[in-house]
Image (cartoon, rainbow, N blue to C red):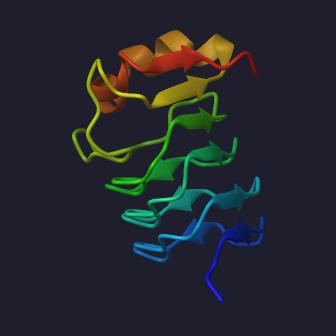
Amino acid sequence: KRLESVTIYPSIALWGSCVFQSCTSLIEVNLKDGLEKIGKQAFANCLSLSSIVIPHSVTEIGGYAFADCALKKVYCKPTTPPRIIKNSRVFGFVDSNSELEINVPTASLDEYKNHPDWSEYSLILKDGYF
């Protein structure tokens, strides 16, 4: 049977590197508050993953964590932008023609847009109304 859904519970603070990399049938990932770090390439090449909610508690996202996924929507709930390595392609390659939309808290939109780590995503950051 192919893995289509996974839930990461609050008791797990760090989700390691490459854990679900290339899990092409994965369509749903439920990350619970309490998770602090998402490891590098944790969900890279998950070709069926079209959206993700990053919980409030996340403070760091590893390089290429969601690269080469089918992501269309990211809901990034932390009010302080999580630490990412600049140009680490956390969400893969994006440009002004990208279909990806990263939704962030209304009160934090400017902080995300002006944060040096998030500069490569400034064109696709949106007001998430949360």
- Residue 116 found in image quarter: top left
Look at the image and tell me in which quarter the C terminus lies: top right
Look at the image and tell me in which quarter the N terminus lies: bottom right
Count the numbered circles shown.
Answer: 0
Q: Position of residue 34 (x, y in %)?
A: 74, 58
Of residues 95 and 19, the one nearer the viewer is: 95
Q: Is residue 106 above or below residue 28?
A: above
- Residue at x 66%, y 71% (from the top left corner): 4
Q: Is residue 46 above or below residue 127?
A: below
Q: Kindly give the residue lying farthest to the left in the view shown.
A: 87
Of residues 53 and 36, the one nearer the viewer is: 53
Query: In the image, 80: left or right of 17?
Result: right
Query: In the image, 55: left or right of 62?
Result: right
Query: In the image, 88: left or right of 56?
Result: left
Q: Kindly give the residue lying farthest to the bottom in the view shown.
A: 1
Of residues 106 and 49, the one nearer the viewer is: 49
Q: Is residue 112 above or below residue 57?
A: above
- Residue 27 found in image quarter: bottom right
Q: Position of residue 52 (x, y in %)?
A: 61, 47
Q: Position of residue 109 (x, y in %)?
A: 55, 14
Q: Position of residue 29 (x, y in %)?
A: 66, 60
- Residue at x 47%, y 20% (from the top left corner): 125
